[in-house]
Amino acid sequence: MTSSQVPNSLRSVAIIQDAPVAFDTAATLQRAVEAIHAARDARLIVFPEAFIGGYPKGIDFGARIGMRSPEGREWFRRYSAGAICVPGKETERLATAARDAAAVVVIGVIERLGKTLFCSALTFAEDGHLLANHRKTMPTAMERLIWGQGDGSTLGPVNTSVGVVGTAICWENYMPQLRLALYAGGVQLYCAPTVDDRDSWIPTVRHIAMEGRCFVLSACQFARRSDYPADYAPVQGDDPATVLIRGGSCIVDPLGNLLAGPLYHEAAILRAGLDLQAIDRAALDLDVVGHYARPDLFQLRVNRQPQIAVSNQPIA
């Protein structure tokens, strides 16, 4: 099929399943730019959670109830040093890569704002404009030690040249209210950057695709112990070949069918062509914010106001 024969509803998408160079932002940024170039034939490119900045799988930052170790504080300093400011020089380079590839890019980053880190997902337009910075609203378990909570002002979704793109990071996908907010925003291309590599993740994203009548693009890291520094000491051990995050990226259609993946135990680029008209076909019998909703029984209120700790505005 030539480009002139491709239906307007068809979207070529790609998922990057790979690992960052942990605690080395410059090297990871180069890896991300090279991956965008390798997937440049796609109109939407999705990276995993915490790709820029890394996911510190298997360490505890020296924290116990009622105590923190000096060694753990030093690991947090090193981790914080690898986080990026948004916007900043790293986002400028990512923007250039998106523009050079003429692709919408969604990428997980560790963002530093003041002294606090956020697990964020950035969405760049095909012209390089930063369309969205979604901060993970609910870090899970030990993640709460190192990441702050995002607020409703970054929820999205956003309109792009490839369709309406929304992002929910890892276990945000287990938050029914957050999913409903994305559905209400008309999300068509639901991006789920994650590091959850368990078998249970695949039925989760298939359910979301069916529930939201949208395409789901789930991007997971594939990382070995060798992707981390030599002095890194995860509970999984020190064998460089040990797999810390095994992948499992996939692409799902609005009826829950797998179009690509899940793929495990290797770095790869997953690709698919998506027919957005499939969303309208699937809406025949389910629209959870429309004809399948019961607002007389259930309603969701979303607070999209930024939550600011210190305001300089005078008290009325």
Image (tube, helix red, strand yellow):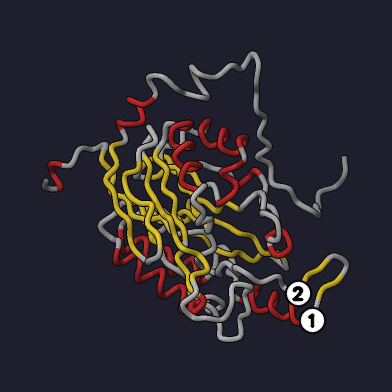
Residue bearing mark 2:
62
Judged left or right of residue 41, residue 228 is right
The C terminus - image quarter: top right
**C-alpha span from label 2 to label 1:** 8 Å
Q: Residue at x 37, y 19 (%)?
A: 284
Look at 41% across and 48% down and name the residue there. Answer: 217
Residue 137 picture location, percent across and down: 65, 49
Give yes or no for contact between labels 2 and 1 (Cβ–Cβ under 8 Å): yes
- Element class at badge 2: loop
Vertical relation: 136 (above or below) 289: below
Which amino acid does the dot numbered 1 rest on? Pro
Q: Dot 2 surroundings within 10 Å: few (below 14), some, or many (20 or more)?
A: some
- Nearest the camera: 31 or 162? 31
276 horizontally vs 222: left or right: left
Q: Residue at x 32, y 35 (%)?
A: 276
Amino acid at circle 2: Gly
Q: Which of label 2 and label 1 is nearer to you?
A: 2
Give percent across and percent down for residue 214.
41, 35
Residue nearest the viewer, comparing 197 with 149: 197
Of callouts 2 and 1, the N-terminal one: 2
Percent position (x, y) of residue 35? 35, 67
Residue at screen point 64% across, 66% down: 112
How many numbered markers are drawn?
2
